[in-house]
Amino acid sequence: MQVREAYDLWSQQYDTSDNRTRDLEAVALRTMLGEVPFTRCLEIGCGTGKNTQWLMTRAQRVTAVDLSEGMLAKAREKITPDTVQFVQADILQPWDFKTGLFDLVTFSLVLEHIEHLVPVLKEAATSLASGGYVYIGELHPFKQYAGTKAHYSTEQGVEVVTCFDHHVSDFLQAARSNGLELLQLSEHFDTDDRSKPPKILSLLLVKK
């Protein structure tokens, strides 16, 4: 199913359904950004605001962007401070929602839906002040290789969202080509059994 339509439908149950990927990525973001300083944050893929609620406690301003109006409607119900601006936008188009430069750009479970990483990371890099950071949290490639894709259940069956596989090297090469350097790479597991593939890959990049 196409991404916008899928997430509009998913928004009705996104916060209440069991979703270990959603929950573990939230942990990954908070862990990786816990000591990172930022005052102006551009959140790409805010969804229903699962990470926005934490980012707004750390930043003076958050611009929270999502493709899905359904997801944004849920986020707006929960998050009302005027320090957060919600924007509906397609990040494959020019980022005309940018207002000045940011200290941090985050991507949470977004890039699996993007076929070509370089143009999107170029927009992210040009949105950053020098020394600014990019956080990426994604379903781990090992899970993608095994066939796992973003999906949810409906009365009609399981809906699978359009996804593209990306290797770890794809993220790093796309970052490097846009002047972003890797600071940290972390892998997050479902359980303490580290003999099984990790579920979430998180990356912290910096603009030099």
Image (cartoon, grey):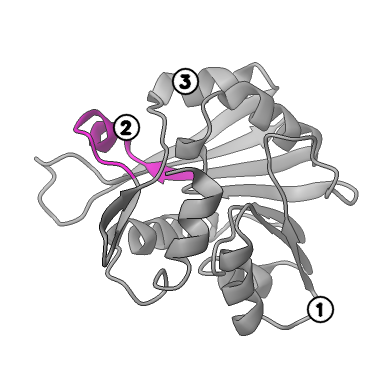
Q: Is residue 158 magenta?
A: no
In screen coordinates, is 106 left or right of 95? left
Residue beneath the point at 74% across and 33% down: 123
First of labels 1, 2 by sequence position: 1
Q: Is residue 138 magenta?
A: yes
What separation in Å lies between label 3 and label 2 (alpha carbons)? 10 Å
First of labels 1, 3 by sequence position: 1
Q: Which residue is mark 2?
A: 141
What separation in Å lies between label 1 and label 2 (alpha carbons)? 37 Å
Q: Quadrant of residue 208?
A: top right
Q: Looking at the picture, which amino acid does disc 3 mark?
A: Asp
In the foreground, 66 or 98 = 66
Question: The N terminus lies in which quarter of the figure?
Answer: top left
| Circle number at residue 82 | 1
Q: Position of residue 170 (x, y in %)?
A: 47, 20
Q: Quadrant of residue 87?
A: bottom right
| Circle number at residue 70 | none
In screen coordinates, is 40 left or right of 184? right
Q: Which residue is mark 3?
A: 170
Q: Looking at the picture, which amino acid does disc 1 mark?
A: Asp
Q: Looking at the picture, which amino acid does disc 2 mark?
A: Pro
Q: Is residue 114 above or below residue 25?
A: above
What is the span of residues highlighted in magenta in the rendered image? 137-149
What is the secondary structure assignment of the residue under circle 2? helix
The 10 Å Cα crowd at callout 3, few under 14, some 14 to 19, many 20 or more, is some
Most distant residue in the right direction: 100
Q: Position of residue 50 (x, y in %)?
A: 51, 69
